Amino acid sequence: MVKETVTIEISNGLETRPIAMLVQVASQFESTIHLENGTKNVNAKSIMGMMTLGLDNGEQVTITADGPDEKEAMKSVVEFLTKDE
């Protein structure tokens, strides 16, 4: 298992479109991927779960990935969350 805390650097925060794109990124991997913020811990492959986080630009989130491609999964999710378009 790999774990990393990052600061979200998406201008509009995680609104509907960025959430859908993040779910697509996470779904490419076999590993389980979860995002945690405060007391909420959700599956990054679940669009409904991700929408409950309500994350904004500048907030910190802890990402965990566990499985055969966990390092690649972590790299892709971190890159997505920390790129400002």
Image: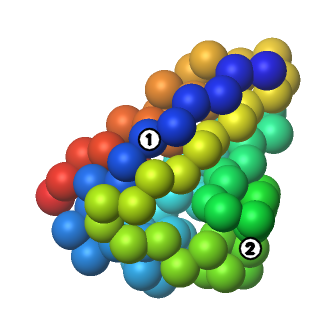
The type of residue carrying mark 1 is Val
Residue at the (25%, 46%) spot, across then down: 83
The type of residue carrying mark 2 is Gly
10 Å crowding of disc 1: few (<14), some (14-19), many (20+)? some
**Image coords of residue 72 (percent x, y):** 57, 21
- Which part of the image, by quadrant, shows the C terminus? bottom left
Does residue 27 show up? Answer: no
Residue at the (66%, 28%) spot, across then down: 3
**Image coords of residue 55 (percent x, y):** 48, 71
Residue at the (38%, 72%) spot, across then down: 56
10 Å crowding of disc 2: few (<14), some (14-19), many (20+)? some
**Residue at the disc numbered 2:** 49
16 to the left or right of 52: left
35 up-or-down from 69: above or below: below
**Residue at the disc numbered 1:** 6
What secondary structure is found at the residue carrying circle 1? strand
Relative depth, front residue between 77 and 36: 36
What secondary structure is found at the residue carrying circle 2? helix
Relative depth, front residue between 29 and 67: 67
31 up-or-down from 83: above or below: above
